Amino acid sequence: MSMYSSAAEAATARSVVTGQFLAKNKWSKARRTRLARQILAGKVELGPLCAKQVAALCRVDVHRLLHVRRGNGHANGRPAETLADHFVRSTLTERQEAARTIGLDVVWDTMISPALAADKADRAR
């Protein structure tokens, strides 16, 4: 069985080269030049690029890019953990300590009371 469903798809199929491969391959200069020509001709598609490559293409400092990308300390590209995610992950002891640190009145006034009011309004609809 062919990996292409039709001859037309096979004719238009392109190779994909990742940024990591570009950065780490041990190819000769001549072979890398041929690859560059194929990329420019659209015969080879670029996959995900690494941060250093994107920074070079955009002419920005890689450290600045990583700082902006990480947002809240995450350099892996994933969004920072939300408070709700952290609460789900925390233990009962950690939640109780957080409530004592924040203050029970603040927790009630800013989290519980508004949530109860919203839930009551949703039920009234």
Image (cartoon, rainbow, N blue to C red):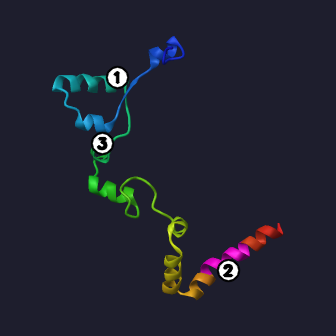
Q: Earlier in the sequence, mark 1 or mark 3?
A: 1
Is disc 1 placed on a helix, strand or loop?
helix
Indicate the quadrant containing the C terminus: top left, top right, bottom left or bottom right. bottom right
Q: Residue at x 67, y 74 (%)?
A: 115
Question: In the rendered structure, which amino acid carries the disc numbered 3?
Answer: Leu
Q: Which mark is residue 113?
A: 2
What kind of residue is marked 1? Ala
Q: Nearer the viewer, residue 53 or 98?
A: 98
Which residue: 38% across, 35% down? 47
Provide the residue designation for mark 3. Answer: 57
- Residue found at x 33% / y 26%: 39
Magenta span? 110-118
**Marks 1 and 3 close (CB-CB < 8 Å):** no
> Residue pushed farthest left?
29
User: Which residue is the site of mark 1?
Assistant: 41
Residue 7 x %, y %: 50, 11
